[in-house]
Image: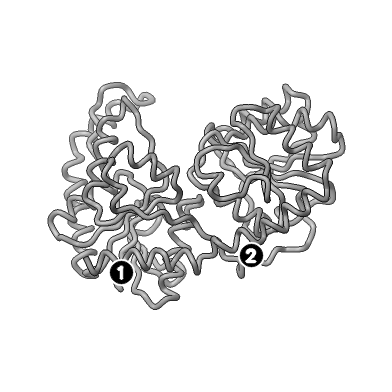
Amino acid sequence: MKILLVPNSYPPQVGGLERVAADLAEELVEKGHNINVVTCVAGHSKKEIVDSINVFRILYPVPRPPFKKMNGAYFSFLVKFFLWPIYATISFVNLAKIIQAMRPDIVNLHYIGDNALYVIIMKILMRFKLVVSVHELRRGNRRLGRNLLIRITLGYADKVTSISRYSLASARRFYPQIERKCTVIGDGIHLDQLEMNRSEIVDYRYILSARRFTFTKGVDILVRAFQLVHEKFPNLRLVLTGDGPEMQRCKDLAARCGIKDFIDFFGFVERSMLMALYKGCELFVLPSRKEGFGIALLEAMAAGKPIVATRVGGVPEVVKEGENAILVEPESPRALAEGIIHLLKNSNLADRFGKRGMEIVKNFTWDKIVRKYIAVYNSVNKA
């Protein structure tokens, strides 16, 4: 099939959605399909080849009324507001040219962002088959335009995939009829590409959390929990990878808690180093306030590590509580600390969890995930 993937973002940008879109594209190419990608402009070339796949980057301007000043750039904002029809027309023409040249059997939109408006209008005009993949949806009373766009997008989709039953439930609140055309397909992992680097990155005992530093990822909760863990295990350290707007706040919190010398903020790390950190940790912690799926959970399981995570979103659909993970209530540093301490004190249980996780993660290999996507694409083509 000729498949046009339309993610909101794509490598070399870094993030969970970007990795999923790139892995899906590469797997589809491996299966013999013709793949092109259209994503947002983000400081890269308008057209480039990423891992042998054509990637087109388009600006997706949307009208946002100038109700308030925006960081002192009010005049600039007004100019963009009144000129957006020109920019939008250029983007529509560029997107139409790509679709016309490719004539895709399937257009697969990943994540409903500003690009969804352009894709839906193109679908109305050019009548292609559309699969919408739901990753994360947020309803907001002050975001009526965004809520309406999500509802319209789900309505025009020929099929919808969601990364978890939790994400499906979120989508159902926008568009109740989604149930009849939705399939749950989780994210995937390349086990054959995750040969863990056995070289030691650090020479001390540590627990690991690989997170973006945002409020929903709950790293501040883990810092507070580690204060309690440190009282029981003073020689244990906490390693945090990733970056984001909450990093400095978490560093300040660690200082106030008196544990800054026992927490290592590694920032963004290359994939080989991250895999080595997974391999060397005592256990993996995911302290999220919200989580649609949690790719880091797959990585931890592939490394054979026990997991302590919050019981939120799609997490219980990825790990098996009591089999390879301890799940605790969110927003509770004490509950998180108790789960960590329990595994640290019970090495036999931790080992059993790690081995079981290596079996569970086999359900999420990209070979299995991509076959589910292809089945959805085929069902749309035959409809």
Q: Which residue is mark 1?
A: 378
Q: Secondary structure at mark 1?
A: helix
| Left or right, 14 with reference to 151 | right
Q: Position of residue 209 (x, y in %)?
A: 66, 43
Amino acid type, mark 1: Asn
The crowding category of the residue bearing disc 1, from other C-alpha atoms within 10 Å (few below 14, some 14 to 19, many at least 20), is some
Label 2 secondary element: loop
How many numbered badges does the structure rendering display? 2
Image quarter hosting the C terminus = bottom left
Dot 2 and dot 1 residues touching (CB under 8 Å): no
The one nearer the camera, 56 or 115, is 115
Tell me what residue is drawn at x 31 percent, y 64 percent: 4
Q: Which circle marks residue 194 in the picture?
A: 2
Residue sitting farthest toward the bottom: 32
Q: In x, y percent, where is residue 153?
A: 25, 46
Point out residue 256 in the picture as x, y percentages from the top left corner.
72, 22
Q: Please tell me whether mark 2 or mark 1 is closer to you in this view.
A: 1
Quadrant in the picture for residue 53: bottom left
- Earlier in the chain: of badge 2 and badge 1, it is 2
Q: Residue at x 28, y 61 (%)?
A: 107
Residue for point 67% across, 60% down? 358
User: Going 39% across and 78% down the picture, which residue do you hit?
Assistant: 32
Q: Is residue 219 left or right of residue 30?
A: right
- Judge by depth and name the residue closer to the eye, 37 or 205: 205
Of all residues, the one furthest to the left in this rendering is 125
